[in-house]
Amino acid sequence: MISRKEVKSIILAAIFLMAFFQFKVLAQSSLDAPRVDIDVNKEWTVKFNSELKPSTVNNTNISITDENNIQVPVIVSLSSDSTTAIISPKTGGYDPGEKYNLFISDEVESALGEKLRSPVHMEFTTVNNYSDGTNYSDLPSISSNEFEYTPLLSSQKQGFFLNCNNWTNIQYRIFVKGEQQNDYTELTDGYTSAVDGKVTAVKTLSSGTNGQEYKAIIYVKRTGVSGAHKDENTEYDNYFIDYFRCVESLSSSGNTYTDYDTTLDQMVNTQLNSSSKPVFVENTIMNNAASKNQIKYYTNPDNFIDYYGRYQFLKLTYSEGLTEDSLNSFLEGKKIFEGKGQAFLDAAKKYNINVCYLVSHAMLETGYGTSQLANGGALDSDGNYLYGKPVYNFFGIGAVDEDPVVKGTEKAYENGWFTPEEAIDGGAKWISEQYINNPSGSQDTLYKMRWNPTNPAQHQYATDIAWAYKQISNIIKSIQEVSSGADTVLEFEIPRFKK
């Protein structure tokens, strides 16, 4: 009788074998254990036990798909000894906290024409953290970058002051992609050397309608040597990711400045190392940990001193000039909020809160009155209200990330917010006492509510690093529509950090 071990040996000897990530597997195998916490810049290498036919090592036969079975644009190449397939990640790396599938087709052939017996599949999930670039050892890598212009004006060409770890005779190549854009634009003319540590873009960029965020990928490689790695943009040794903003013009009317006894870098590092990990909510994933340079982009007030961006710094204390009719006109069609203009006005005046902010915050948190917390709260398994009657929470108070609807419902019940009017009043009181008019230190701008520059990483309203910026469109719309014809004076308080 042949043992199982002997049968396996016979099979392994009879077919074209592959060594997969240091594991020997049958060609028809699927790696059962999914890989987890994979770096978003992971470059997979698949080593075979004989040379491969180059024409079969391609994106058709070796591919990566996302969770929706959509193919991801990776680069598939063959090693110099023709025994290893290299799968380089998409430009800028994989998305954090996402599931992917690596497929190797049975159309991959050895140099002698032998095919894999069956396809091979491996599932992997990336670590839940955005990255600021690669760090392949023994190669030049960028340690830091400072932008010449923050923000960049659409008439200027951005400058990059770069530091590279212990390497000379190197060159850089820079690409950028605007928010909501799919394609990268090159800012250099191929690889170029830095002059006095600076690389200057060869072209200007568009500011868009309300300012445009740009993600920059700065590649570095040894001069005269092909890069050790590659993506859709270029070959490279390492790359560095940073962010800047392009605007049409700066705005100064109504601006005041407050100095803080900390540097921007200290502010960023404190946020990065806090127990309440800052996240970047790009789409619907609520807990992707933000990278250092993402945090730096949103904490740096200099990026937002334009007409649109500076609304993060709008003073949120009460000002006269709005009427019930103008508010109700704005709230028409806003579901539960329709006709509640006087309730917002009363609460704003009572608790010294800017009514336009109060309204826009409620719109943002409830999806313009459509959220479950705005319409009675959580339900039990039988479809009944959790506490036997509807409760209302319009400002996301207590709606912590792990179970926002239930936790937000509990907070509403505890505070007795059983009518929309009670929820507006109670929410305004809570925000006023806890943030805007807090006697221990007022956080009376969206920026201060999010970042609390007086005591960084403590007592912050949200974990999403873009929270303050995301409210701008609503608050501007509210001010324009609600205050039409009213004599309102806007004041902006800009933080200023030590140099």
Image (cartoon, rainbow, N blue to C red):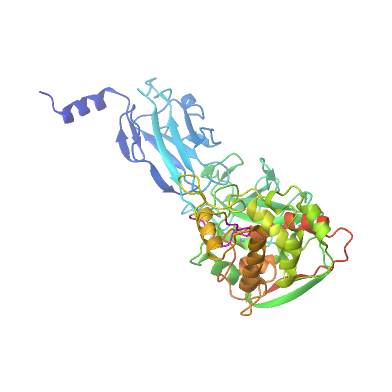
Which quadrant, please, contains the C terminus?
A: bottom right
Residue 409 position (above or below residue 97): below
| Residue found farthest to the left | 1
Q: Position of residue 201 (x, y in %)?
A: 73, 52
For the point 68% across and 65% down, the residue is 446
Most common SS among magenta residues: loop
Tell which of 153 and 223 is nearer to you: 153
For the point 54% across and 45% down, the residue is 227
Tell which of 234 and 154 is nearer to you: 154
Q: Position of residue 298 (x, y in %)?
A: 65, 61
Which quadrant, please, contains the N terminus?
A: top left
- Residue range corresponding to the magenta coloring: 391-402
Magenta segment includes 259: no
The answer to whether residue 149 is visible is no
Q: In which image quadrant can residue 447 be found? A: bottom right
Q: Position of residue 59 (x, y in %)?
A: 51, 30
The answer to whether residue 334 is visible is yes
Tell which of 256 and 356 is nearer to you: 356
Horizontal relation, residue 343 to residue 75: left or right: right
Horizontal relation, residue 161 to residue 26: left or right: right
Residue 282 position (above or below residue 295): above
Q: Position of residue 162 (x, y in %)?
A: 63, 60
Horizontal relation, residue 51 to residue 468: left or right: left
Q: In which image quadrant can residue 459 be found? A: bottom right
Tell which of 29 and 287 is nearer to you: 287
